Image (cartoon, rainbow, N blue to C red):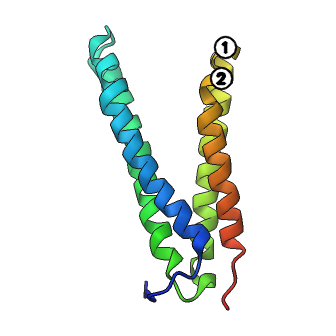
Amino acid sequence: MKHQGMVKNYFYLVVGILCVLFAGTQTWDGLQTISPVLHDSNIDSSTLTVFTYQWFIIIAEQLVFGIALIAMAFQKNMEKVRIVGWVIMAALFIRGLVIVVVTVSLGIGSITNLLTSTIVIFILVILLLLGVRVTDK
């Protein structure tokens, strides 16, 4: 990808930065909150391994999305990177849908736990929707 020095798509830039920041906060939260609870519980090692790598898969995905979107924000030709914006938007939307469906299926009492993540994903998807609509000037 050839880069120009000027930002061509501020929506991609903002979502990219947010994705990188969320990868960082997800890592911090996992190391400070989730990991100690999992290690102190009585779950078997294979279940612990699955929980741990799934947590970090989301972090890696978020980081890749962020880096890609930041690079895309500087692309001269928005048409060339538009499909990537759509794919990232679809992946985030599906992730949000999975979070809602799984949380709701595990019990109505846990709906309040998904409010923040649902709002964040909704905002990212809206910003990406605006970003994929940016045309070359």
Local packing at callout 2 (Cα closer than 10 Å; few below 14, some 14-19, many 20+) is few
Tags 2 and 1 in contact by the CB under 8 Å rule?
yes
The residue at the point 37 percent across, 47 percent down is 24
Identify which residue is drawn at 62% across, 46% down. 121
Disc on res. 112: 2
Residue name at image x 63 percent, y 17 percent: 106
Query: Which residue is at 27% across, 18% downward?
Result: 39
Furthest residue in direction bottom, as rendered: 137
Measured as percent of width and height from the top left, residue 49 is found at 31, 28
Q: Secondary structure at mark 2?
A: helix
Where on the picture, by quarter, is residue 130? bottom right
Give the left or right position of residue 39, taking residue 15 as reference: left
Viewer can see residue 61: no
**Which mark, residue 58?**
none
For disc 1, the neighbor class at 10 Å (few under 14, some 14 to 19, many from 20) is few
Quarter of the figure with the N terminus: bottom left
Q: Would you name the residue on which mark 1 appears?
A: 109
Does 47 sit left or right of 126 as displayed?
Answer: left
Q: Secondary structure at mark 1?
A: helix
Gap between marks 2 and 1, in whole Å? 7 Å
Q: Depth check: 9 or 43 in front?
A: 9
On the question of residue 47 being in view, the answer is yes
Q: Is residue 90 above or below residue 44?
A: below
Q: Label 2 is placed on what type of residue?
A: Thr
> Which residue type carries mark 1?
Gly
Pinpoint residue 2: horizontal percent, then vertical percent: 43, 88
Position of 115 relative to 44 (above/below): below
x and y, in percent, of residue 78 in the image: 61, 82
**Left or right: 122 as drawn, with respect to 80:** right
Asked if 101 appears above or below 91 in the picture, the reply is above
